Image: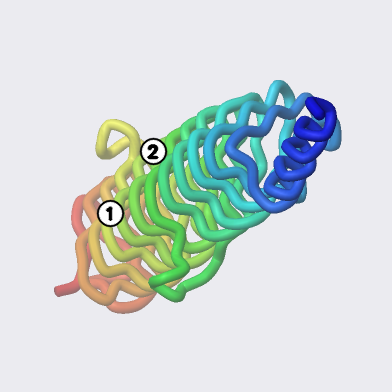
Amino acid sequence: MKKLVLSVVLAAAGAVFAETTPAMVSLVTPVQAPSSDVDVAGIRFSLIYGECGGFKGLDLGIANRTRGEFTGVGIGGANIADGAFCGGHIGLVNWNENASRDWDRVSKGCQIGLLNRAGSFCGLQDGVVNVIDGRFTGLQGAFLNFTQDLYGCQCGFYVFLGVNVASGSVRGCQLGLVNYAEEMEKGLQVGIVNIISRGGWAPVLPIVNGCF
């Protein structure tokens, strides 16, 4: 009887774990439990490298990858999220592939690390190098800040020691040693060299350039 009850419990648990699990432990994927196809709603710990489907909760480890959407807090050497991101990533490298410009699908939160990269992002990036492939809304603070479109502020280390680049349009401000904007819709550049290809007071100005 006990064996029968145990078998039923394990079978039920297996059915639940086939879709989602409250806990996951990984050595190096695929050496992990449960498998990398499962979503996590709880906590994950990756001793070296771990993968999962979607994630909600607390993510800890050396290298953590979420192939689906990520909601929660991730702390590790490398934090990787392929889908929409909502929450915080703190690590040496924080990497988010999501490039959606749909406001409901844009990644939102903070990335804090040496290298922070995302598709389109709303929130805070704080690091040595920050890279956005699409549109950034919020504050970028690093030695090198790069985005396509900027709606907010790029700020170099110690305010003016750094390089800020917006390869698209800017509505906001850039504070750094060198500031570049392809197009200034409305905003201000403050630094030693300020370059605006279209829409500025001049193509190149020292100290201050902008458009209002």
User: From the viewer's perspective, is residue 17 above or below residue 7?
Assistant: below
| Residue 195 image position (x, y, % from top left) | 35, 62
Label 2: state its secondary structure: strand
Left or right of 186: which side holds 66? right
Q: Residue at x 41, y 46 (%)?
A: 87
| Residue 108 image position (x, y, % from top left) | 40, 55
Q: CA distance from mark 1 to mark 2?
A: 12 Å
Image quadrant in which you'd find residue 104: bottom left
Residue 167 visible in the displayed image: no
Q: Nearer the viewer, residue 165 or 52?
A: 52
Residue to which mark 1 is pinned: 153
| Residue 71 image position (x, y, % from top left) | 47, 49
Identity, as a three-letter code, of the amino acid under mark 2: Asp
Q: Quadrant of the N terminus?
A: top right
Q: Nearer the viewer, residue 125 or 201?
A: 125
Q: Residue at x 45, y 43 (%)?
A: 72
Identity, as a three-letter code, of the amino acid under mark 1: Cys
Q: Residue furthest top?
A: 47
Left or right of 185: which side holds 25? right
Left or right of 63: which side holds 115? left
Q: How many marks?
A: 2
User: From the viewer's perspective, is residue 14 above or below residue 23?
Assistant: below
Label 1: state its secondary structure: strand
Residue 165 visible in the displayed image: yes
Residue to which mark 2 is pinned: 126
Q: Residue furthest left?
A: 212
